[in-house]
Amino acid sequence: MWEMFHFWALLSFPRPVLDKAWLDLCEALDRTGDRLCEVSSQEALILLRSCLSAPKVLHIVRCSPCVSHPSLQLFGSLLRSALQRITDSDFSDSQWLQASLPVRDGGLGVRRVSSLALPVYLASAASTPVQDEMLFGCAGSENTFFQTYKYLSS
């Protein structure tokens, strides 16, 4: 297990860089949330859903094991706040869960990054054994993949 986790840790952002990146993204979302109130609600929702929520942080979440990073919760609360300002309503926890569902499931399509962090990172890790073997001459086995999953999800 350690070999695969060590390999991913080497390619991941160092902790101070990751902290700074999350801080910058949270500040940008906070600023942008204020500016979205200046356009129509429909345009603001489309911008928030398509550009400013999960798509904005997908690369960081995919490349670094930030499942338990405290900024995920901060980003989620800023996202919820921006959506509440756009829709001019307050969401209860159950309403926020529904709003964060995909549109096809009755939500607004604004995905919570905290719920995507683990699956996105593991999907990225699982899709690279061929590249790992080409680059480094070794690939993690299926067993080490599941051990990494257990380590990150605990």
Image (cartoon, helix red, strand yellow):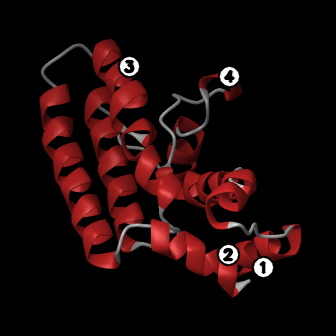
Percent position of residue 133, x then y: 72, 60
> Element at badge 4?
helix
Circles 2 and 3, Cβ within 8 Å, touching? The answer is: no
- Residue 139 horizontal side relative to residue 44, left or right: right
Which mark is in front, 2 or 4?
2
Q: Nearer the viewer, mark 1 or mark 2?
A: 2
Looking at the image, residue 98 lies above or below residue 120: above
- Please say whether residue 154 is visible from this viewpoint: no
Look at 34% across and 14% down and name the residue there: 42
- Tell me the residue at 33%/35% (across/down): 52
Q: Which mark is residue 4?
A: 2
Labels 3 and 1: the sequence-earlier one: 3
Q: Please indicate whether residue 60 sits to the left or right of residue 23 in the image.
A: right
- Label 2 secondary element: helix
What's the CA distance linking mark 4 and mark 1? 33 Å
Task: State how far apart marks 3 and 1 are (Cα).
Answer: 38 Å
Read off the residue under disc 4. 104
Q: Nearer the viewer, mark 4 or mark 1?
A: 1
Query: Earlier along the polypeptide chain: callout 1 or callout 2?
Result: 2
Front position among marks 2 and 3: 2
Does the residue at mark 1 contact the one at mark 2 (Cβ under 8 Å)?
yes
Toward the viewer: 24 or 105? Answer: 24
For the residues marked 4 and 3, what is the alpha-carbon distance in whole angstroms? 15 Å
- The residue beneath circle 1 is 147
Mark 2 vs mark 3: which is more N-terminal? Answer: 2
Crowding at dot 1, Cα within 10 Å, few <14 / some 14-19 / many 20+, comes out as some
Placement of 142 over or under 117, stated as above or below: below
